[in-house]
Image (cartoon, rainbow, N blue to C red):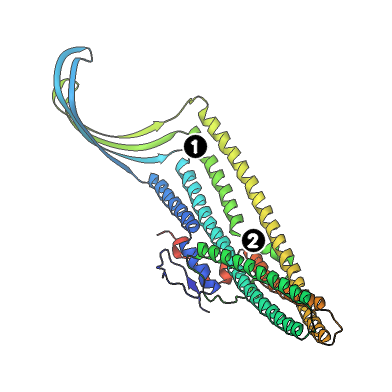
Amino acid sequence: MRRLILIPILALSAQAQALTLEESVAEAINHHPTIWQKYASFEAAVRYKRAAVGDYLPQVKLYGGVGYESVRYNSGQRIDTELDRTEIGVRVSQLLFDGFRTTSEIDRLDFEKEAERLGLLSDAENLSLEVSRVYLELSMANKIVELSERNIKEHQEVLKNIESRRDKGLSSDSDVAQVRARLATSQSGYLSARNNQMDKQARYYDLVGQLPKDLHDPQPDFEFVPTNLPDAIRLALENHPEIDAAILDTQAANAQYEREKSDFWPTLSLELQANKNDNIGGIEGPDEDARAMLMLSYDLFSGGSTTDRTEAASWRYQQSLAISKNTQKQVEEGTRLAWNAYEFIGQQRGFYRENVDQAVKAEQGYAKQFELGRRSLLDVLDAKVEVFLARKHYITAHYNYNIAAYRLINATGYLMESFRVDTPEAWTEEK
């Protein structure tokens, strides 16, 4: 089966072209600013983690300086000299132990990086749902515009027939006026449908970056639609990226707590240093030295700052736990709402289909009875309105049912997969 491959940069043709729903989703994900914003945040998180890993490696610093030095006394000995002082040296330090601060920081940034990646996938899933909804709503709007045009033509035919009957003395001017009033109503309804159609086109352009043309009539892949509510909730809780991202945020908060606790421990490092100086301390001539030392640093008192930061990190962890639980509740609630819409709109669609069949039969029967003088013109016009509304309701239910199906697939986190859309490797692998 053909899959649409997303790439970070994709050239777009300015010319409008017919796009399937799947292609529209791919275009939106490739170019929408929301996705690029989230992708940039993910890339930043990747590099922050790499920067933290660098603390494991030796740190090499070259330093130097030149300037004027005036010395009157050196270790109690009067010197009273003015010299041009120069310094140059190199220092190599290797961290041996920092109370697990670096380890905890790397863990924290790794969790945050993965949370950003899952947030990116979640945003792509939600954008896919929005594109699906607008695509189907635009298709629905196109159908309703066509239906409205047909309704106008039918009223025009009725008006022509009634005017002919009036000329023959079989109908009155009031009958003609009544039909013309209904015709004006149908024309007003057409303009309303066109306005809605143009709004959907504008929304489609905002999401996809192209003007819509010759839209296809998409059908959800019902293999991805759960067959019952318990399965839908289970899939959502197991697979939805927002839940996994919230869990990772909790783990990141815990790692931050461990990082803040590291300040209660001493820091131990190995330092190698060599200096080549001149005119130091008021004594003319070279001053060179080299040393290798184990350096220990232990913060005995910091005004309570370490304790406060640790407690603050602990509360951040509690906050992230609450957010994670709330995210699970929201995902479950969204899944229930999506299931309810899918279930009940599906049932409504069957009734609307029956409504169309019966309304058409009634209209045909009323038209024949009108010719025989057994029905009034008002009955015929009302029957025509009933057919129009029945067809409109069925079209609306048909597309809303498919929208509800996509919404349910999105609630379980499988919408992009159902479209056979592959995410870029950059979303899953460090470059």
Tag 1's secondary structure?
helix
At label 1, counting other C-alpha atoms closer than 10 Å, the crowd grade (few under 14, some 14-19, many 20 or more) is: many
Q: Decide if residue 207 is in sight here.
A: yes
Pick the residue in front: 49 or 180: 180
- The residue that label 2 is drawn on is 238
Q: Is residue 336 above or below residue 227?
A: above
188 sits to left or right of 75: right
Please report the residue visible at 55 percent of the width from the left and 35 percent of the height from the top: 310
Give x and y (percent) for residue 22. Answer: 54, 72
Give x and y (percent) for residue 21. Answer: 55, 72
At label 2, counting other C-alpha atoms closer than 10 Å, the crowd grade (few under 14, some 14-19, many 20 or more) is: few
Q: Decide if residue 288 is in sight here.
A: no
Q: Is residue 187 above or below residue 282?
A: below
Please report the residue visible at 73 percent of the width from the left and 85 percent of the height from the top: 164
Pick the residue in front: 44 or 6: 6
Q: Amino acid at mark 1?
A: Ser
Give x and y (percent) for residue 127. Answer: 55, 61
Instruction: Confirm or deny contact between disc 1 and disc 2 (CB under 8 A).
Output: no
* Mark 1 vs 2, N-terminal side: 2
322 sits to left or right of 281: right
Q: Which mark is residue 382?
A: none
- The residue that label 1 is drawn on is 262
Can you tell which quarter of the image residue 78 is in? top left
The C terminus: image quadrant:
bottom left
Most extreme residue toward the left, as rendered? 285
Give x and y (percent) for residue 135. Answer: 58, 69
